[in-house]
Image: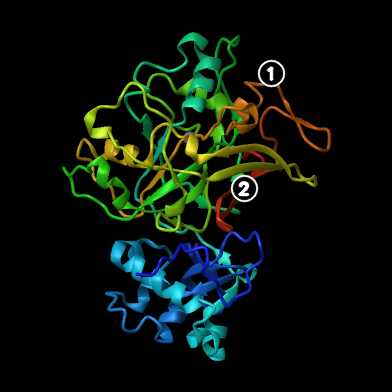
Amino acid sequence: MANLNDPALRSWIDIAPGSDFPIQNLPFGVFETDERGTRVGVAIGDYVLDLYAVSQFGFFRGLDLPTEPKVFRRRSLNRFIALGRPVWRAVRQRVSELLRHDNPELRDNEEAMRSCLVRQREVRMLRPVKPQNYTDFYSSIEHATNVGTMFRDPANALLPNWKWIPIGYHGRTSSIVVSGTDIRRPNGQRKAPDAAVPTFGPSQQLDFELEVAFVVGQGTALGDTVPVAQAEEHIFGLTLFNDWSARDLQSWEYVPLGPFLAKNFGSSISPWVVTLDALEPFRVAGPAQDPEPLPYLQLAGQHNLDLNLEVTLTPPGGAEATICRSNFKYMYWSMAQQLAHHASNGCPIEVGDLYASGTISGQRPDSYGSMLELNWRGTKPLTLPDGSQRKFLQDGDTVTMRGYCEKNGVRIGFGEVRGTVLPAAQ
Ligand code: MN
């Protein structure tokens, strides 16, 4: 099999320098136009390759795919993903071949090319998967330390279980939305420390959380477990993830059972799922783990990803400002460890499930992945280019997250996940 990540590969499609979607990436997503309806597509440069059209023109013939073309007309990638790793790999391989600069099959077939390629600006991107389950972890040691320092005790910022267990909680899938969907400020209970009783109303401390989520590609049956060394075989790919959070609701409700309504009013994901295969060249070792994890979580080798992340804030009518630069490589617990732990009690995982990393903070103050940390619980407000200040998000603010890996002149980008805050319901 050819190396689809080879930096020397080129496409006959013009791809602007700095594009997130060179021929080495080929992420999967679901898009819609009035003419085509709903289609599964692959991003290439400024275009989407319509996989249903590709199959209709016979370009997948001979691949011995157990695919019906219908799988490329669904409203989510779930059915496609469920066909299994050999199928995703064969399709990505074939798409790479069709787009290579020296392959005339699609390049020189004008009718097919017009049908198979659509400009990204002409499509509406949909939520790429229909998750049955969503879990949010808490796996950045910098984030957990910052939060523990602010809310509890700087000397004992990490709770005793943190370095033994990839801490997480079960979230809701019903409010997971695709990039571009507005997020309404939630109403809820909040109680100021000096107030006698709580009140109900709009959250005054709306925040974002910079996260990366992985999509499960292979499920398990009830009672099955996933050995940590095989956990990555269960992962289809990754998206950017904004876990919007209402800090005032959270600090009142989270004792003793953890996050609840402060977290599940909306979470945004980027529309393109970047495959683990495309990210292979960007593997790095994670931070040293001390104490050594229990045997079922022990895994040598490179299981983190050098994935640059940034967050911008755009006030209504104002200029976009970068407020955070972080990296997914900082994560203390790897995706493989998270998944092995998650399945260790026999609870099934399912195709399309989303497992979010937890807020990804680095060591420097400008790498903190939430406003709570960036402004250190309101003591260091952010100043935006227009001179306005923010402790938390205001109505009309837009938060945009972007991510990319880069090496040897190849940039594997994730696109973006964006959302604008709407006023709370009256
Ligand atoms: Mn979170």
Q: Going by the image, does 344 lie left or right of 193?
A: left
Residue drawn at 16 percent across, 42 percent down: 223
Please state the total of marks drawn on the protein image: 2
How far across and how far down the image is residue 136, in percent? 41, 37
Residue drawn at 63 percent across, 27 percent down: 365
The quadrant where residue 377 appears: top right
Looking at numbered disc 2 in the image, what kind of residue is underneath it?
Gly
- For mark 2, does the 10 Å Cα neighbourhood hold few (<14), some (14 to 19), or many (20 or more) residues? many
Residue 91 to residue 229: above or below: below
Q: Between residue 349 and residue 285, name the one nearer to us.
A: 285
Asked if one can make out residue 265 in the rendered structure from this viewpoint, the answer is no
Residue drawn at 32 percent across, 77 percent down: 68
Residue 99 to residue 184: above or below: below
How far across and how far down the image is residue 297, in percent? 27, 33
**Residue located beneath label 2 in the image:** 419
The quadrant where residue 318 appears: top right
Residue drawn at 63 percent across, 73 percent down: 14
Q: Which mark is residue 295?
A: none
Q: Which mark is residue 379?
A: 1
Asked if one can make out residue 333 in the rendered structure from this viewpoint, the answer is yes
**Residue at mark 1: C-beta within 8 A of ligand 1:** no
CA gap between label 2 and label 1 equals: 25 Å
How far across and how far down the image is residue 280, in percent? 42, 53
Spot the residue most to the left: 223
Quadrant position of the N terminus in the picture: bottom left
Q: Going by the image, does 364 lie left or right of 28?
A: right
Q: Secondary structure at mark 1?
A: loop
Q: Secondary structure at mark 2?
A: strand
Residue 285 to residue 251: above or below: below
Q: Going by the image, does 15 lie left or right of 157?
A: right
Looking at numbered disc 1 in the image, what kind of residue is underneath it?
Thr
How far across and how far down the image is residue 144, in percent? 48, 24
